[in-house]
Image: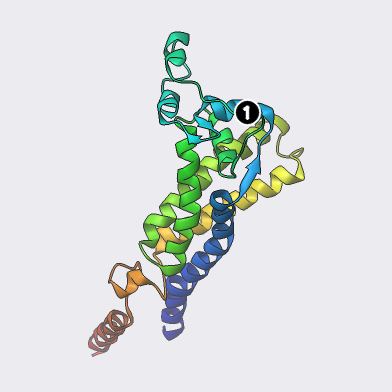
Amino acid sequence: MIRMRWSERFATGLVPLMARALLCAALLPLGWQKVFTLTAFSATDTATLNRIGLGDDGLDWSRVQATGPSWQSASPETLAAAPATTSQGPLTARSLYRIALVCDAGGVPFPAIAAWLVALTELVGSLMLIAGFFARRAAFAVACIMGGAIWMTSLPALRANGWWSLPMDDYLRLWTQCGLMMLALVVLLSGAGWLTVDGALGQGGTRSGAQGRRADASATKGRSKGQD
């Protein structure tokens, strides 16, 4: 029975802690690169980014609004009414706009905004996870973006090539995305585990040490009464 109690404590304390650490180690560098590094986009990608609202001077919000849920089915007159955003030659912009290209190809509304949300989720969400601060909310956001990444990047490759002919790069990307999503679900379903701000505030998914000792004492007393 004592061995079982320790296994339960490790399962609800150590395992989520390890999941949080792995998620932070994987996502923090990705979010940092997306937000703080620059990428030189090709002429074709620059044209696409111009269309969704990104130019040399940054985002043009009047153009971004035209990329809402109905922009693909809008009439040419409606699209023409939005001011054009153009760049002189290939565009150099934040790396996160590569995600905007993926979102645009997948038909996601407001792809430029979606790219910022993904990058900030990776950057800020990973810090929230390692600190254990609103960890379940951060884990839910990470699980959502990993699910979206699987839907828009890995599943098309899987449908095009089949499971047994999937290129190695796509195969590794698929399982990396699945692994990160599973780690996020561990934190979402089990709580933040040990060493968390949530635990100090009484919001963690696991019991505090004092609560656990009281529960163990109550269980021991109940067994003693049952034996009597």
Residue 178: % across, % down: 58, 50
Regarding residue 50, the answer to whether it shows in the image is yes
Q: Nearer the viewer, residue 142 or 226?
A: 142
Q: Quadrant of the N terminus?
A: bottom left
| Location of residue 2 with respect to 196 vertically, above or below | below
- At 37% across and 65% down in the image, what residue appears? 133
| Location of residue 225 with respect to 38 vertically, above or below | below
- At 42% across and 23% down in the image, what residue appears? 66
Residue 208 relative to residue 77: left or right: left
Residue 182: % across, % down: 52, 55
- At 44% across and 81% down in the image, what residue appears? 6
Q: Nearer the viewer, residue 219 or 159?
A: 159
Q: Nearer the viewer, residue 190 or 29?
A: 29
Callout 1, which amino acid? Gln
Identify the image quadrant of residue 5. Answer: bottom left
Residue 132: % across, % down: 40, 67
- At 49% across and 56% down in the image, what residue appears? 123
Residue 191 relative to residue 153: left or right: left
Q: Residues within 10 Å of mark 1 (few under 14, many from 20)?
A: few
Q: Quadrant of the C terminus?
A: bottom left
Residue 124 relative to residue 26: left or right: left
Identify the image quadrant of residue 102. Answer: top right
Provide the secondary structure element on which disc 1 rests: loop
Residue 75: % across, % down: 44, 10
Regarding residue 206, the answer to whether it shows in the image is no
Residue topped by disc 1? 88
